[in-house]
Image: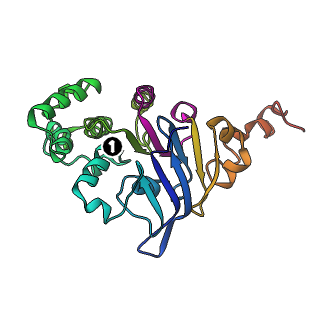
Amino acid sequence: MPEPLLVCSDVSFSYLERFPALDGVSMEVRPGEKLALLGANGSGKSTLLKVLDGLVFPQSGSFTAFGQPVTEDTLEDEQMSQGFRSRVGFVFQNSDAQVFSPSVTEEIAFGPLQMGLSREETLVRIDEVLAMLDIADLADRAPFQLSGGQKKRVAIASVLVMNPEVLLFDEPTAALDPRTQEWLTGLIEELSAAGKTIVHATHDLDALERLADRCLVFSETHRIVAEGTPQDILADRDLLLDVNLIHRNSRAFLTSVPDLTAGGTRPGSDE
């Protein structure tokens, strides 16, 4: 089995050193997998993505990427920082927090130019990613002129232009219309088929079997409490209830709830 790309060992982190977000989290990201981080809002999954992207650092425990420790000190080394930043890309949940340049072209060019690519190569990459995401017509538009779905595509383009090995998505389908949700789900499947390693945080179970082949489940105590395939996790109703991913009136429980409107019982009921 190949060595994992990203490894967290007993990682803990609190905001302002008072508000726990991760409590003794150990996990690894394997090459080429689609890994889902599941949990209710505030369970720690988004904070873990920030650790994996080197945006925050463990207050205890350790994080290594591609066999190298990732700390504030190690990322001060320019070669280490550029190597790490070029291999891991993060698509934020809120595109407004990510898209900030005067035009779409300048937004997508920012990363490659910061990494030292020539202007000529940067322009070639921009054309390729604009065509790939079918947003060439947005090239000269300002971000404030874009719809939510268009901003999401631009945010993804600004990451894909770097051709990272690992892609991190925070709640990728949140607040998107159904057509854009389906497009993004299909894109993640295509990226995975092309060999990219995908990690995404979500509490949306509807597309889980398409977006993941392994799941880590967070409890509201900021710990990982379960690991398994999407099929295994979705079949464990008690687990999903305990971690606040479903409630007793959700579709997962309807087979055991009496059908009062019909005056009878639903299939599978003991009554």
- Between 104 and 123, the one nearer to me in the picture: 123
Instruction: Name the side, left or right, on which 207 lies relative to 85.
Output: right
- Residue 158: x %, y % from top left: 25, 39
Q: Residue at x 11, y 37 (%)?
A: 118
Q: Residue at x 56, y 57 (%)?
A: 26
> Is 7 located above or below residue 22 in the figure?
above
Quadrant, the N terminus? top right
Q: Residue at x 37, y 62 (%)?
A: 56
Reply yes or no: does residue 242 show up in magenta.
Answer: no
Quadrant, the C terminus? top right
- Residue 186: x %, y % from top left: 43, 26
- Residue 30: x %, y % from top left: 50, 41
Dot 1: within a 10 Å radius of its alpha carbon, few (fewer than 14), some, or many (20 or more) residues? some
Quadrant in the picture for residue 105:
top left
Instruction: Name the side, left or right, on which 145 lies relative to 132.
Output: left
Q: Residue furthest right?
A: 271
User: Which residue matches tag 1?
Assistant: 87
Mark 1: amino acid: Arg
Residue range highlighted in magenta: 186-212
Q: Residue at x 72, y 44 (%)?
A: 237
Please state the total of marks drawn on the protein image.
Answer: 1
